[in-house]
Image (spheres, helix red, strand yellow):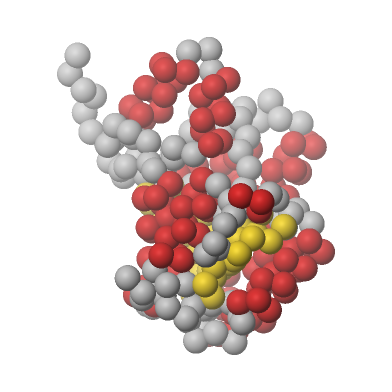
Amino acid sequence: MSELSGLKALVTGGASGIGRATAALLAARGADVAVLDLDPSAVGEPLRGYLADVSDDASVRSAVAAAAEALGGVDILVNNAGIGAVGTVGDNDDAEWHRVLDVNVLGMVRTTRAALPRLRASAHAAVVNTCSIAATAGLPQRALYSASKGAVLSLTLAMATDHVREGIRVNCVNPGTADTPWIGRLLDRAADPAEERKALDARQPMGRLVTAEEVAAAIVYLASPAAASVTGTALAVDGGMQGLRPRPRAR
């Protein structure tokens, strides 16, 4: 499949998890892909790896400029880099709030701002932000994380409005609980990892975690010319968690 042949893509946080799956699928569909990550050492061909810290504007601008020069432009930007947070509003101090919001929200601002001149020059410009089910559903022990992803959802709509007449589409994906390294680390720290995983599986109507590849497929669709009339949309990839209310399983 080569429907993205000739298109140039940047993926932040693309060295692992959803970002890595997205970068790999973009490349498999024909795009030339650059990964921007804190540790791009594991990124191999056909992907191009660039060191970037989305919490530092100079780092972002340098990486985007280098990647855009090597690729010969930017058509697709996937704002995927992000960090998690656990706890109620009483559990995280101001420093942690600033740190998470700086990465999860301002990180997208910095990368998009740096890529905008290249996106404006593209005939197929698309930005896809990795949001979360946490933006639209109240999840326990996720106050800070939910606030950051709620901001990403609103940011996506505002960006889509601002840039629609420039020919730049902006959408986001809202994954449910995904089977990623971050979730794996949370499970490892649980008192009973097996029971905690069962609880996470049961929270999604399909009865299992979402895979990184499933989220990647949604991101790549939104980034592709096949979605040329799709902008300002949040696409849920959550096993039915947002909209379905099945009866509890019979015991």
Res 231 visible: no
Residue that appears at 21% across and 28% down = 247
Q: From what the image shows, is residue 77 above or below residue 148?
A: below
Q: Quadrant of the C terminus?
A: top left
Residue that appears at 23% across and 24% down = 248
Q: Nearer the viewer, residue 13 or 206?
A: 13
Residue that appears at 75% across and 43% down = 99
Report x, y in % for residue 161: 53, 74
Q: Is residue 19 left or right of residue 98?
A: left
Q: From what the image shows, is residue 235 above or below residue 250?
A: below
Q: Is residue 244 left or right of residue 212?
A: left
Q: Is residue 226 left or right of residue 76?
A: left
Q: From what the image shows, is residue 179 above or below residue 74?
A: above
Q: Is residue 104 left or right of residue 140?
A: right
Q: Quadrant of the N terminus?
A: bottom left
Res 199 visible: yes
Residue that appears at 54% across and 22% down = 188
Report x, y in % for residue 57: 79, 62
Report x, y in % for residue 220: 42, 64
- Total marks shown come to 0
Q: Residue 80 is drawn in which quadrant?
A: bottom right
Q: Residue 173 is drawn in which quadrant?
A: bottom left
Q: Nearer the viewer, residue 182 or 44?
A: 44
Report x, y in % for residue 18: 49, 49
Name the residue furthest front: 45
